[in-house]
Image (spheres, rainbow, N blue to C red):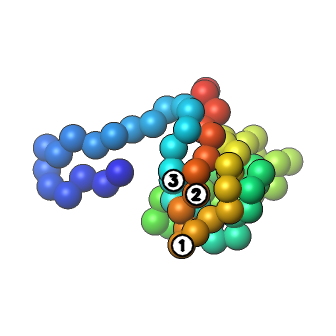
Amino acid sequence: EAAAAADDDIRIVTHGYVVANVHASTGIGSQLCGPITIAGRADLALETTHSPLAVALEADTANLAAIWLFPR
């Protein structure tokens, strides 16, 4: 989430189920990897380049998808 004003509380998810901004080509089962890029969407980098941070539980709709964020 983004803060609308100074001192706003925001929700931060560290692991588990969340609906998140994702890359436009995200499909169900896509491995979502870092680094995080423009507008907070996860970049779909090759697994050999970056270790996955999450897996998509559904295909994106307007850059949003349910994901499972792995604990670190």
Mark sitting earlier along the chain (2/3): 3
Residue 49 drawn at (x, y percent): 80, 50
Q: Distance between the residues labelled 2 and 3?
A: 6 Å
Whether 18 is drawn above or below 58: the answer is: above
Residue 46 drawn at (x, y percent): 81, 55
Mark sitting earlier along the chain (1/3): 3
Residue 20 badge: 3
- To which residue does mark 2 refer? 65
User: Along the horizontal axis of the image, is 12 left or right of 69?
Assistant: left
Q: SS for tag 3?
A: strand
Q: Residues within 10 Å of mark 2 (few under 14, many from 20)?
A: many
Q: SS for tag 2?
A: strand
Three-letter residue code for mark 1: Ala
Q: How far apart are marks 1 and 3 (CA)?
A: 11 Å
**Can residue 36 be spotted in the picture?**
no
Residue 2 drawn at (x, y percent): 31, 54
Whether 61 is drawn above or below 10: the answer is: below
The residue under the point 62% across, 65% down is 60
- To which residue does mark 1 refer? 62
Q: Distance between the residues labelled 2 and 1?
A: 9 Å
